[in-house]
Amino acid sequence: MEKLIIIFLILIIFISCEPKKDKPVLEGSWKGELRLGDSVIPLVFNISRNDQDELTGTMDSPDQKVFGIPLDQITVENKSIKLNLSSINASFSGSFNSEGQLDGTWEQNGKSLPMILNKLDGPIDYSKPQDPKEPYPYNSIDISFENTDAGITLAGTLTYPEGNGPFPALVLVTGSGPQDRDEKILGHRPFLVLSDYLTRLGIAVLRFDDRGIGESEGDFTTATTMDFTLDAQAAVEYLVSQEYTAVGNMGILGHSEGGYIAPMVADMNEEIDFIILMAGPGIIGSEVILTQTKAIMQAQGVSEEVIEQAININKNVYSIINKEEDLELVSDQIMDIFLSAGMSEDAAKSQLPGLLTPWFLYFISYNPAPVLERTTIPVLAINGTLDLQVLYRENLGAIEEALIKAGNTNFTIKEFQGLNHLFQKAETGLMEEYGKIEVTIEPEVLEYIGDWIQNIN
């Protein structure tokens, strides 16, 4: 009996001395490959924890020049995980294997592919030549502010010069789609580059994550342009409250859809003293999309017959949306249009959700003219001649016409030859070029904006 007890004690000691296996850590960067026939598409998942100790992250597709797709839901149960990306209707589900890999399945639009994720030693450096490097010769702090009407907290970064000020101040407003504070797109971070340049000139700049993106609260998927306008209004109120910002020298800059938002904020806020529109629309939303569609298809070499058919289909769809309030009836009528045009039922159904979102329903009917026709503060409106998303002739012309009607005597309209929607030197202006171009914003554009702000009368 005594011998058995000794053996039992030895076993306990032996077991307790066995090395414990580390619990798998999800935080970090993970790389996997999707294999489609002979093609291989690398994907990189970047996962971290926020201040509330919640897992958050993004996904990059480097070969496709797509970066920062938000992981809107990360689920962990024992050794199993699920990463959800609703913006592209995709997810990855897997579990840790004995090698510390995440072995699982990529699912997108009803199709599944096996994929194994391997943990990287650190994040991949996608930086572009114009990305600023720390230490900065100015103050850069992470901040948060409240949109009390929406009941959400928005997060951003405020950069301001050394010294006591007061300094000229500017709020940056992103374009359409889920955007973080740097307006990250295809490897570029335009708002990071812009804020760095302007702050070095002595201007305080606030940029912030869209609601529901990055560290900002709220639901991006249910928001409209008006909701984003109220978020930007909250950003202005925060910046106005800072002691080092100059009263009488406060501006708002909007890029793309932000060009709709900036005048709307200025229209409701007397604290705004000037507006900058970078590739901002000056025409009704439906016309923005129609002209965009035509220009992109022409640049892609699509025949005029096919382009005309696509434009007519879109016009009919927008007409139904603008006339009919019953969304179920709208859905049925749009389906009839698609099926009559020869589209398969599955393809038609896949198009419907995007056409019936709150954002799209608001956007296509929004006309910026009434607000611009009330705008009498200084305005700078710029665009590139190779912008295929917001065409320069149609939109700069409409902005100028509206400002003249407003009796505005202090505005500047400027077109930049050969620049695209991101203000890069381009060949075609198509989006596929954005990530291939190393320059984020042409220096002449940065200089023009900086000079204009410093010389506002």
Image: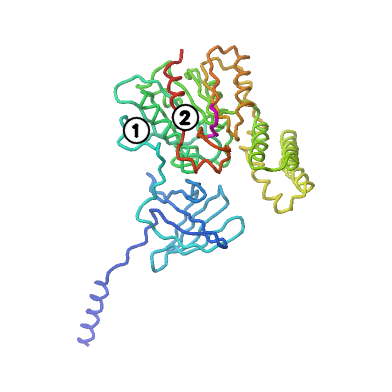
44 or 231, nearer to the observer: 44
The residue carrying mark 1 is 140
Tell me whether circle 2 and circle 1 mark residues in contact (CB < 8 Å). Answer: no
Q: Residue 66: in sight, yes or no?
A: yes
- Please state the total of marks drawn on the protein image: 2
Residue type at mark 2 is Leu
Q: Estimate how packed mark 2 is, as few (under 14), some (14 to 19) or many (20 or more) residues with alpha carbons within 10 Å.
A: many
Residue 362 position (above or below residue 59): above
Tell me which amino acid carries mark 1.
Answer: Ser
The answer to whether residue 153 is seen in the rendering is no
| Residue shown at 74% from the left, 50% from the top | 343
Precedes in sequence: disc 2 or disc 1: 1
**What's the CA distance linking mark 2 and mark 1?**
15 Å
Pointer 2 residue: 172
Which residues are the magenta region? Answer: 416-421
Residue 7 in which image quadrant: bottom left
Image color mode: rainbow
